[in-house]
Amino acid sequence: MSADSTEQDCIFCAIARGDIPSDGVYADDHVIAFRDINPQAPSHVLVAPRRHVASIDELKDDQEFLGRVMAVAITVAQAEELAESGYRLATNHGRDGAQSVPHLHVHVLGGRALNGRLG
């Protein structure tokens, strides 16, 4: 998918609209969370805005909404019972940052000891 993806051709927007089924774990009026179809850990959930936001850079001036997305990520980690043992929150931006879907999403990973490598 190209970096200039729009709401009409965005897979995460289609999931948010209910056009594509997902294994949802959280939803409110602004944010959704669903299990990754290619999990990298026993618990791997994606947290994404319902509205089309291409990447985290677009929320630089909307810290309140960015905080909402991160608060949902923490809520998901707690619901997945990851808080005690630990978890990782990660988001990617752009091609060199390994962003594969041009819609902001935060990975919530846990359920086992994660590799300390980030790159």
Image: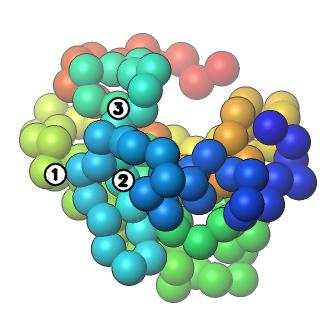
The residue that label 2 is drawn on is 33
Q: Is residue 61 above or below residue 33?
A: below
Q: Mark 1 is on which residue type?
A: Gln
Q: Quick one: label 1 or label 2, which is nearer the N terminus?
A: 2
- Helix, strand or loop at label 3? It is strand
Which residue lies at the image location 66% right of the left edge and 66% below the top edge? 52
- Crowdedness of circle 3 by 10 Å Cα count: few (<14), some, many (20+)? many
Q: Quick one: label 1 or label 3, which is nearer the N terminus?
A: 3
The residue that label 3 is drawn on is 44
**Is any atom of residue 109 visible in this view?**
no
Measuring from the top left, give residue 24's x and y in whole percent.
29, 49
Q: Mark 2 is on which residue type?
A: Ala
Residue 118 quadrant: top right
Q: Mark 3 is on which residue type?
A: His
Which residue lies at the image location 64% right of the left edge and 83% below the top edge? 62
- Crowdedness of circle 1 by 10 Å Cα count: few (<14), some, many (20+)? some
Which residue lies at the image location 71% right of the left edge and 83% below the top edge? 61
